[in-house]
Amino acid sequence: MLGYTQFPQYYSFQGADLANDPEFTQFHSQFLTHAQPTALPARHGFAPLPQQGSGTSSQEENIGNSIEAIEVDQDPEEELLKQLAKMSTYKANATQRLGGLSNAINQMGEKLQHHERAPQLNDTLASRLEKFEEHLDQFGKRLEKVEERLEKVEERLERDTKRIDHMVAGVNDTNKVFRDVLIRIARRPSRGNVGQSCEEGFDTYVVGGDIEDS
């Protein structure tokens, strides 16, 4: 058995005659350089694929479920933008590695086409590639959900901004009314010569107390 313990989850096959083949050993090393889904965070659904015969892991079935829940009413817009940018980067890296993995599979198929187990090996690698593509597709769907939540946050911020503007305008109107009332009180003849009697904090001063009510 020619065992590739560095990356057993992608393939294993009979082929002792290849164990001492320098060309194949070099290519195998190049293949591993491309086929590294573990370079992406496992919490985003890119954990290593299971070894053949081990069945489908729950993480494959529920890819991305471990991504932190982003609640519209809890996370600020800045945090959502950071997570969106981070996930976009992961998706881009995964897409690039997917291309490298596909090329490596094609090259390995050419090198092993005369080997008796080449068809079975190619089928195994193609199956692994298909699973990785499914992972990437599901991750893209998770990314779309984050983008939708970000849109909701932006809508909420816009509504809040309008509501705050309305509240500020209301406070300004109330201040104006209060200011006018103080001025009218200060101008009543019954107060006599009140001098500069308007309250501090308002920018109008009434000089003298002989001015009739307006």
Image (tube, rainbow, N blue to C red):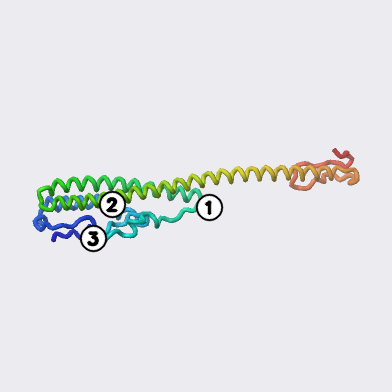
Q: Decide which of tag 3 and tag 2 comes sooner along the chain.
A: 3
Answer left or right for 77 relative to 161.
left
Q: Judge by depth and name the residue closer to the eye, 90 or 204.
A: 90
Q: CA distance from mark 3 to mark 2?
A: 14 Å
> Looking at the rendered structure, which numbered label has been put on residue 131?
2
Does residue 95 appear to the left or right of 208 in the view shown?
left
Question: At numbered mark 1, what does the secondary structure look like: helix, strand or loop?
Answer: loop
Query: Label 1 belongs to which residue?
Result: 73
Q: Residues within 10 Å of mark 3 (few under 14, many from 20)?
A: few
The quadrant in which residue 174 appears is top right
Query: At numbered mark 3, what does the secondary structure look like: helix, strand or loop?
Result: loop
- Which residue is located at x 89 percent, y 46 percent? 191
C-alpha span from label 3 to label 1:
44 Å
Q: Position of residue 119 (x, y in %)?
A: 15, 50
Q: Secondary structure at mark 2?
A: helix
Label 1 to label 2: alpha-carbon separation: 35 Å
Which of the two marks, 1 or 2, is nearer to us in this view?
A: 2
The image position of residue 185, as x and y in percent, is 84, 45
Name the residue at 17% across, 52% down. 121
Q: Are marks 3 and 1 in contact (CB under 8 Å)?
A: no
Q: Quadrant of residue 205?
A: top right
Looking at the image, tell me whether mark 3 or mark 1 is earlier in sequence order: 3
Residue type at numbered disc 2: Lys
Q: Nearer the viewer, mark 3 or mark 1?
A: 3
Q: Can you identify the residue that label 3 sits on?
A: 53
